[in-house]
Every structure is written in structure tokens, then in C-alpha cells.
Amino acid sequence: GYAKTWRPTEGLVQPRIILAMGRFAAQALLASDEPLGRLRGRVHRYRGVPVVATYHPAYLLRTPADKARAWEDLCLAASVVATTGAAA
């Protein structure tokens, strides 16, 4: 799965934040079966790294009404980076 293909690079990559885009990415990283709607809007952790779940870009192309919600997710992610002092 997705999380397994990402894991070999974990030692090389030290992300400040992970933006999980889409249900599959969010559920795989968070080892959760919760719907994306429940995973959105809060900060999760994956091995100590903050994770924010949001909609997949393809979904947003099909459902433009949810772009505002995706923007809220991006603002949450930016806020996490700003408050942790992780911005480069």
C-alpha cells in the first residue's frame, strides 16, 4: 500500500508536516478506517510528524463546492507549521 512505499524513505525525509490528500492517503498514514470527513479539520500525528487530511485534487475538480473546505485544511496546515516554528 501507499504507506509501505513511503516508509523506505523515512530516514531520508524529515517533513515538517504531511498533507494527506484524499481518503486513501489519510487512512493509510493514520491506520484508520474513519471517513475523510471525520479525519479533516484536526491535526493528527504520524511518527511525531503533524498530519492534516484534506480532499484529493481530483475530487475537488469534480466537486468545486468543497474547495472552501480544502482551503480551511491548507490554512490549518500552514498554522501548524507557523506555530511550531518549522517554517524555513
Image: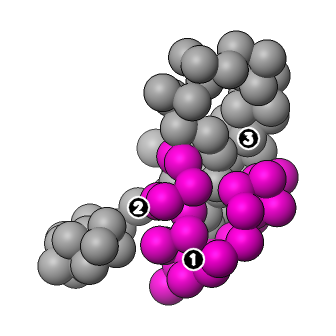
Q: Nearer the viewer, mark 3 or mark 2?
A: 3
What amino acid type is highlighted by mark number 2? Pro
What amino acid type is highlighted by mark number 1? Leu
Few, some or many residues within 10 Å of mark 2 (<14, 14–19, 20+): few
Q: Tell me the residue at 47%/59% (across/down).
A: 25
> What kind of element bears circle 1?
helix
What amino acid type is highlighted by mark number 3? Asp
Residue bearing the label numbered 2: 15
The residue closer to the viewer here, 84 or 11, is 11
Which of disc 2 and disc 3 is earlier in sequence? 2
CA–CA distance in space, label 1 to label 3: 16 Å
Q: Position of residue 83 (x, y in %)?
A: 75, 54
Above or below 48: residue 56? above
In the image, taking residue 83 as reference, residue 9 lies left or right, namely left
Q: How many dots with numbers? A: 3
Magenta region includes residue 16? no
Which of disc 2 and disc 1 is earlier in sequence? 2
Q: Position of residue 72 (x, y in %)?
A: 80, 34
Above or below 44: residue 87? above
In magenta, the rendered stretch is 21-49
Which of disc 3 and disc 1 is earlier in sequence? 1
Magenta region includes residue 47? yes
Residue bearing the label numbered 1: 30
Q: Tell me the residue at 71%/32% (across/down).
A: 70
Question: Can residue 17 be seen?
Answer: no
Residue bearing the label numbered 3: 73
Disc 1 and disc 3 in contact, CB within 8 angstroms: no
The residue closer to the viewer here, 21 or 44, is 21
Few, some or many residues within 10 Å of mark 3 (<14, 14–19, 20+): many
